[in-house]
Image (cartoon, rainbow, N blue to C red):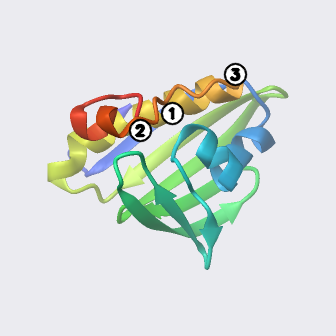
Amino acid sequence: MAAGNDNRVVWRVGLPCARERAFAALATREGREAFWAETAPEHDGAIHFAFPNGVKARSAVLQNEPPSLYEIDYFGMPTRFTLEGAAPDKTVLTVDARNIPDADFQDVHAGWVSVLMAMKCWLATGYDLRNHDVQQSWDQRFVEN
């Protein structure tokens, strides 16, 4: 589900694991680096993301309430992850990104699908869908960056 008229993107995805494992994928360096960013250490209350195309971002951690809520300021956009246990080994993750600049809406809308599908694959199989290639990054319209 996505809506552009309020500068917000909301997506939901079913994950094949317990909430605690899904939460750890978002809230730990090891988790984030397995499907999302090349490096993503957290210190001084922020995640320091680095991506294959050389882009770096400092994302303040706004809320950290294991295993149900994690929120960061991602590229200046408050982004909330809500995790609901659907069953002992199933979680529904909702990502809600707000305050998206009009010029960035299309990339943010598509970008979250790319991140969430990579996360789901890694949690289900342990496989990293990304190519880790600076020549085949989001800038060149590759979705598996």
Q: Position of residue 107 (x, y in %)?
A: 26, 41
Residue matched to label 1: 116
Quadrant containing the N terminus is top left
Depth check, front residue: 103 or 8? 103
Task: For marks 2 and 1, give the CA distance.
Answer: 6 Å
Look at the image and tell me whether residue 3 can be seen: no
Please name the amino acid that badge 2 sits on: Trp
Task: For marks 3 and 1, give the CA distance.
Answer: 12 Å
Q: Label for residue 112?
A: 2
Dot 2 and dot 1 residues touching (CB under 8 Å): yes
Q: Secondary structure at mark 1?
A: helix
Q: Is residue 89 above or below residue 71?
A: above
| Number of marks in the rendered image | 3
Q: Position of residue 126 (x, y in %)?
A: 70, 26
Q: Residues within 10 Å of mark 1 (few under 14, many from 20)?
A: many
Corner quadrant of residue 28: bottom right
Q: Going by the picture, which residue comes out furthest to the left?
A: 103
Q: Residues within 10 Å of mark 3 (few under 14, many from 20)?
A: few
Residue matched to label 3: 124
Depth check, front residue: 143 or 137? 137
Dot 2 and dot 3 residues touching (CB under 8 Å): no
Q: Is residue 6 above or below residue 123?
A: below
Q: Position of residue 10 (x, y in %)?
A: 41, 40
